[in-house]
Image: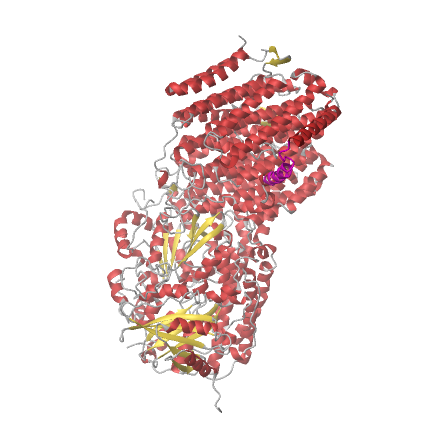
Amino acid sequence: MREKSTTLYLGPQHPGITGNMMVKLQLEGDTIVKATTHVGYLHRAFEKLIERRNWMQSTTILCRFCVPEPDPPEAAFALAVEQIEGREVPERGKYLRSLVLELARIQSFMLWYAGQNGSAGLYTVGQWSVGDRNYVLDLFEELTGGRIYHMYIWPGGVRRDIPEGFEDKVLHTMDYIEKRIDDYDRMMFDSAIFQKRAQGVGIISKEKAMEWGVVGAPLRGCGIGHDVRKDNPYDAYDKLDFQMGIFDGGDVWARAKVRQFEIRQSISMVRQIIQNLPKGDYLNKMPNPMKWTIPAGSAYGKVESVRGEFGFHVVSDGSDKPRRVHARGPAYAHGISLLEDILVGENLADVSFIMNSLGVCPPEIER
Amino acid sequence: MNSLILLLILMFGGALFAFILNKFVPALRDIFVVLLMLGVSYLFFSTGISNRLNFDVLGIHMQWGFTSASYLFGIIVVVLGSLALIYSTAYMKGKDRLGYFYMNFLFSIGAMLGILMSRDLISLFFFWEIMTWSSYFIVIYSGNDVDRRGLKYMIFSAIGAYSMLMAIVIVNSFIGSFLLEDVFASIFAIGSGYQIAIAILLMIGFGVKSAMMPLHVWAPRAYSESPMSYTAVFSGALSKMGVFGFALVLFNLVSTQNWLINEVVAWLAAITSVLATFYAVIQSDAKKLLAYSSIAQIGYIIIGLASNTYLGVMAGLFLAVLHAVFKSTLFMAVGAVERQVGTTDMTKISGLIRRMPWTFVATLISIIALAGLPPLGGFVGKWMLYEALITSGHYYLVIMVFLSSTAAFLYSYRILFGMFLGQEEPEFAHVKEAPLSMLIPMLILSGISVLSGSHPGFILEPIQSAMASFGFQSNLPHESWWELTVLFNTWGDKVALVNVLTSIVGVFLIALAFITIKGYKNQRYVTTKDISSSGEIIQPEDNMTFQIDFYKPFERAIWPLLKRKIDDYYTDFGKGLEALFDFVRRFYNGNGQFYAIYVMAFLALLLIAGTKYFGF
Amino acid sequence: MGTTYSKEEILAQQLQTAFEHLITEVVRKDTVFAFATKEQVSSILLYAKEKLGYISFVHLSCVDWLESGEFELVYIIWSPETKINLFVKTRLDRENPSMENTDMIWRQINTYQREIREMFGVEFPGFVGEKEFILEDWEDAPPMRRDFDTLEYVNDTFFEREGREDKQDVRERIAKRSGEEIPDFAKKYSRE
Amino acid sequence: MYNDKNAQTIVDYIQNFTRKNSLFMLAYGTGCGAIELPATLTSRYDAERLGVRGAATPRQADLLLITGYLSTKTLKRVIRVYEQMQDPKYVIGFGSCTINGGMYWDSYNTIKLLDKYIPVDVYINGCMPRPESVISGFQELKRLIAAGKADGAKKYKENLEWYRENQKKVLKNWPLVEYNW
Amino acid sequence: MNTILIQILGALATILLAFIVGMFYGGAHRKVIARIQNRVGPPIYQNFIDVLKLYSKETSINHGVMQHMGPVFAITASITSLMFVPILTDGNWFSNLNFSGDLVFLVYMMVFGSLGMALGAGQTGNPNSAIGVTRGLSQMVGYEIPFVMAMVALMTQFHTTSITGMIAVQQQSGTWLMFSNPFAFMAAIMAMLGMFSYAPFDIVTAPAEVSSGPISEFGGKYLGMMMTSGSIFAFVKLALFVDIFMGGASNLVVLVIKTFALYMIPVLYGVISPRYRTEQAITYFWKWPLFFGFIAILYAAF
C-alpha cells in the first residue's frame, strides 16, 4: 500500500544535500512528517582496510575519513597510538599539530560559510569564502605538499618542520582572512532574511542533545559548554588562550553564532602559536616505519574537530598492524538519528539549511 | 392552452409521471426524462417574452410571463437542465430510488422556470418553496441526513423564506398589490427606511440561495453531497435564481439615493469571494473545492450587479451565464471522475490524464475559463468587471476582486493537478473514459466557453436586451453578434478579442509545431515512474505525487484570516440558542393557564408591533 | 590513610564496591577499563550514568578476537566532572553472538547497534532499527569479521585494470617515458 | 575532402562549438573528490568562465562528474542518473580511484574500473586532482567534443548488453527501469 | 495583404529584438554576479551558447502531451504579451498589437505562461515540480496584489487603462509616472522583485530545496524553449515598466539604457540576499508593498 504522505528523496543526487547521502522525507504540504536518513553511499570499508595495512600505511587512509577537515582524524589516531605506546611528542611537534589543526578548522569554517549560505540561496558569501579558503590551502600546500589531504600528523609528532618564512605567510593570511570574515558576517548575520530563516529553526533541546550525543558547535549552541580542547586538553591547547563560544537557543542561528565566534578564536590561536612556537625537535622518530610494532592495548584518542569531538578507538594486538580501528565522527550520532528526529515538523525549505548547520558529513559516518 | 401553463404542466406532470414510470417500466425512464426536457426546451424557446397570463386566485391577482431578463436566466436553466439530464442518464445508472431522484430533479427545474415566469410575489414565493424542497430532497438523496447537511440547508432556506415572506407582507401592506409591475412602479413612494428594510429582507432570501457570505455555510456540503449531475444544475442554475433575485432587487427596488446598499452588497460579495476562494484553496476534495469556488464566483457576479454601471452589470450577467457553463462542466467532470474512479478525494487520485483524456480536455477548458485567462470566455467577463470597477472608482473593491481571482489560480491548478496530473499509479490503470452521454454535455458546454472568449456576442446580445429591461441602454456598437469582438470601457480603452485569439493561437501553433518537429525522431515518452528522484529508485510504497496540504505555505500566510470559520460562529450561535431554549423550556411547565397567558401576551405584542410598523 | 587516590582509582573503587566480581584497571591518565560480564553491562552503564555522573556516551565498538573465538564489545562513557573515559568491556561468544539491547539508556546507541549488527552480525534482541544501514543487498558474511577476506571478494567481484600490481615502482617507467632522470633524493627512497 | 566521411559539416561544427562551450555539470558529489569542485567553481579557478555550470537534475545535465571512488550502492544511482541524462552526454572520471581503484584497491565495497560500467570520456588522475587538473580535464573534454570524438553515450547505447552484464555482476538486486535514452 | 506582411515582419523583428536583448541581459546578469563574487564570469554571450546547445540536444524526453506543451504555453504567453507592450513610443515598427489590449489584459496574459508551464510540470509526476509550482503560485498571489494596486492607482489617476495612454500622459506632461505617483512606483518595483524571481524570491527553482523545481524534468529542447521564453519575458517585463513608469523610449538606445538600469535592481538586490521561505515571501509582499499600494491609490484618488 502506498504511503499517504508524499515521498521526496533528498539525495543522493541533490544540490541541497551535504555530500553523498540521502534523506527520505515524507511530506504533508511542505511540512515533514517523517524523515529517514540513508547512508552508506560512501562506504569504503576503511576500518577493514586499516586492518590490512601496517601502522604507518594507515596514515594515508586516516585523512580521508572526513573530506572537509582531514587533519583531526590524523591527530586523533596519533593520540590514541601515542597513548598505547607511551610515546612522547616534542613540544614543537605539539605546537605544529595545533597550528595545522587550527588552520584546518579555519578552512573548514570557510567551507561551512559556503554551505550554510548556499543552502539559503546566498551564493555570494560562498563564492567569496571558498575563494579565500584557497589561501589557507596554499599554506597547507607549502607546509605539507597537499591541498586537501596532508598526512602531516604522525604518531610521535609531525612529518616535517615548517619551511622558511612560513610564519610570516601565516600571519599575513590570517590578517587577510580576519578582514574578510567581517565582510561575510555583514552579509550573512546582518541580513534580516537570514535572521528570519535561521531563528527558531532546527531546534535541539539540551536534553535531546545529551541523549543523542550531540557534540561540537551544535552542543555549544544548546548552551552546554563541552570542548575537548578545554576538557581533555591535547597537543598545545592547554597553553593557548581561547574561549568556547556558548550560545543558547539550540537553533540554526545559535549554531551559526558559535561558529562565527570560534573562527575568530582560531585565528587568534594561530597567532599565539606562531608567536610562542618553541624551538627543538618536531618528531619523536619511530624505528623503521615498515616494521614498526605497537604493544598490545587499546585507547580512545579524541580531538575537537570543527564539528565536534572526533575519536578513534584503537586496539593493538602487538603486531605491526592494527587489530581494530573504529572511528567516531562528530556527525555519527546527530547526522543520522537526531536528524530524523528534529526534521519532523520542519519545513522542506529548511532541510538543507539544518543539515549544513549541524555539519552532517557522510564520509565519516559510513567510513 | 397558454404555453406557459403547458410548460409548467409538462414539467410537473412529467416529473410525477417519471416517478410512476420508474415503478413500472424503469427501462423507459431515462429516455422519457430526456425527451421531456428536450420538449420543454423547445416549448420554452418557442414561447418568447411577450406572452402574459393573468388570473386570480383567492382574490389575489397574479401574472405569469417572461421578461427579457428572466428569459436570459431561463435559457441557462433549460440548456443546463437538458444537458444535465442527458449526463444524468449515464451518471445515475445503477443507483436506486431513481424515480424519486428524477421527480425532484424535474420538479426543481420546473420550479425554476416558474420563478422566472412569475410576475407577482406570491407565485414567486410559491415556486421558490417548491425549488427549495425539491433541492432539499435531492441533497438528502444519497442517504440519511449525515452531519445534518440537509438540515443546515433547510434551516437557512427557511430563514430566507421567512424574510422573503416578511418582505412580501410589508410590500403588500404598503402597495396593496403583489404584482411586480405595481411594486416596481410605486416602491419609491414609500419611505426610504422601509425601502431599505424590504431590500434587505429580500436580499437575505436571495442571498441564501446564491450562497452569499455569511449565509453560505450550507453550500459546500450541499453542493458536494448531492449527485454531481444535480449539482451541475444546483450550482449552475439554481444559485442563479438568487442572482436573478438580486438583480430584481438592486435595479428595481433600491433607489439611486441608497447607493450605500449597493456598496455594502458589493463589499459583502467581495469578502465572500475572497474568503470563499481562500477556503477553496485549502480544500482537498474536488467537490468541496468546486463548491467553495461557486460561492466565490457568485461573489463576482453580485459585485458586477451591485456596481450599478453598464459594464459592471453586463459583466455580472455575462459571468452568471458563463459560470453556469463552466462550473457545471466542472461538476460534471468531477462527477465523471467520481463515477469512474470511485472517489473525488484529490489526496487519493492522481494521473488520470491518459485514462480520461476527454474529461481532462473539458476540465482544462473550463478551468481556463474559470481562472479568467485569455482567450476564453472567463477573461471577457473578468475584463469587463475590472474595467467597470476601475472606471467607476471602486479602487479597493477591484483589489479585492483581483486578490480573489489571483488566488483562484491556486485552486484551478489544484483541481487539474489533483485529478489528472501527477504520477500515474497502477491502481488507476483499469480506469476508463466516461461514457459518451456524459462526455457530450461536457464538451458542448466547453465549446460555449471557447466560443465566448473571442465572440462573446451570442451571450452579450440577450444580456443587452435583458439589461434594457433593467434600464441600461446599450452602448456597444455592433451589427451582428459575430462582429461583437471588441470591448470598450467608458474611458475608451479597449480589448480586441479576435486579435488576442489570433495572437495566442498563432504563436501557440507555431511554437508547438517547432517543438514537435525539432528532433521528432529522438523524442521519447517515458512513464511518470521514470523521474529524476535524486537518483534513487522509486519503491512501490512511495507516493511520489504531491497531494496533501497542497498550498501549505499559502495557508500559513493567510492563516490569520482562516483561523476561525464562519461555520464556527453558527455553531456557537446554535449552542447559545440551545441554552436559550433551555431557559425558555422552564416556562413551559405543563400548566395550561400559563400557555394561555403566553399566547395572549404574544398576540398583544404582535398587535402593538403590527399597528406601529406595518399599519394593519 | 596517608595515600591520596587519583580520580581514576576512586572511580575504579566505586565501581568495584557497587558490582561484585567486576575487574577494573586504571590504564593511564583519564582512562579506566572495567571488564564486565554480558549481563552486567547495562546495570554498570545505568549506574555510571545515574550515580557517578557519566552522562555522556562516547563510543560503542566491537573487536573481533578471531583467535579466541570471541567478540569484544567496548562501551566508552565520559563524565564532564572527572573527565575520565570509562571503558566497559565485555566479551561475547563468536558463535551466535547476541547482546542485550541498551539503546534506552542512551538513544545514540541505536546507531552503533545498527552498525555492529550489520558489520559483525551481533544480534541485539528486542532492538528496533532498520536492518540495512550502510550496505545494500549484502549477501556475504558480515564484512568486518576478520575471517571475511576482502581481497578475495574483490578478485571475485570486481574488474582490475591490467598492469596493476602491488608494490610496483613506476618511477623508472615514468622517467623513461618522459625522458627525465630520476632525481637523487627520489633514488634514496627507492624500495630496491 | 568531400569524400571524407569524418569531415565535419558546418552544422556539426556549430553544434560541437555550442556543446563544448556549454557544459551543464550534474550536481552529484559521488565521492570525496567533490571537495575540490567548490574550489573549481569559485573565484580563484572559476570554471564558469569556461561555460561549465551546475545543473540540478540529470534531465538538464550534459556532464557527469564521477568525483572519486564509487561504492556499489552509489554505482546503482550513478547508472540510474546517467541513463536519465539526455544525449549527447559526457562522463569524466575524476581521481585515481575511478581509474584503477586507487587506494581502495582491496575494498570490498568500491568498484575498481569505472569504464566497465559506464563509458568514460576523460579521466583525470590524482588523489585528489587539483582544480587546475580538473580544468585541464574540462579542456581535454572540450577538445574531444570539438573533434566529435566524445561519443561515450553512443558506445553505451550500442554495447548496452555488455555494460548491463558488468553492472549486474556487481549489483545483485536490479530493480531499475530499463534504459530509455 | 501588404499590411499583414508588414505586421508579421514587425512582429518577427520585435521577437528577435526581445530575444537578443533578453539573452544579453541574462549574460550580463551572470557577468555582474560573477564580478561581485570576485570571478571573471562567463562571456556575455554565454546564454546564446547555452540555448543553442539545448536546442541541439539529440534526445528529448517527455512524460506526456502536457509536458510537451508546457514550454509552448510559456513562450506563447511571452510572445503574446510582447505583442501588446509598446516597445518604442513612436515609429511604426514594433507597434504590433499595442492598441488591441490594455493593462488588465496584460496582467492576465503574463500569468498565462506560468500556469501553462505549471501544467507541464505537473504532468511529469515529479514531487519537486509540484512543490515548486505550489510555491510559485503562492508567491504569485503575493506579488500580483501590490503590482495591481500600483496599476490601479495609475489608472485612476490618469483615467486610462491602456499602456499607450499612459505613455501619452507622460509625453504630454513631461514627467515620468515614477515621479507623478512615487508610491505606485515603490509598490510596483517591490512587486517586480518577485516577478523576476531572483533572490530572495527564487523559491520556485531553489536548487537546494526542490532541486530546480518545476523545470526539474525538462531538458534539451524543452529547457531551451523555456530559456528563450524566459529571456523574452524578462524583456517584456522591463519594457512594460519602462513604458509605464519611465516615459517609454523613443529609440532603441534609450530603451536599452532604461531597461538595463531597471534590470539591475532585482539583480543587485538578489546578489546580497538569501532566499525567503515561501510564506515569508508572501508576507513580505503583503506588508510594505501593500502599504505603498494603498497609499498610492489614496494619492491617486484624492
Residue E210 visible (yes or no): yes
Which residue appears at 56% of the width and 57% of the height?
A200
Main SS of residues in magenta = helix
Q: Image height check: is B348 above or below A90? A: above
- Span colored in magenta: B571-591
Which residue appears at 71% of the width and 34% of the height?
E172
Foreground residue among A270 and C69 = C69
Foreground residue among A54 and A233 = A233
The tally of labels here is 0
Colour pattern: secondary structure
**Which residue is situated farthest in the top direction here?**
B1
Please say whether residue B605 is one of the residues in the magenta stretch. Answer: no
Determine the image quadrant of residue D94.
bottom left
Residue B457 visible (yes or no): no
Residue A58, percent across and down? 36, 73
Foreground residue among C136 and B54 = B54
In the displayed structure, does residue C176 sit left or right of residue B397? left
**Which residue is situated farthest in the bottom direction here?**
C2
Determine the image quadrant of residue E158.
top right
In the displayed structure, does residue B433 sit left or right of residue B466? left
Residue B597, percent across and down? 69, 30
Residue A96, percent across and down? 48, 77
In the displayed structure, does residue E271 sit left or right of residue B179? left
Q: Image height check: is E259 above or below B314? A: below
Q: Image height check: is C144 above or below B507? A: below
The quarter of the rendered structure image containing the C terminus of chain B is: top right
Residue A107, percent across and down? 50, 67
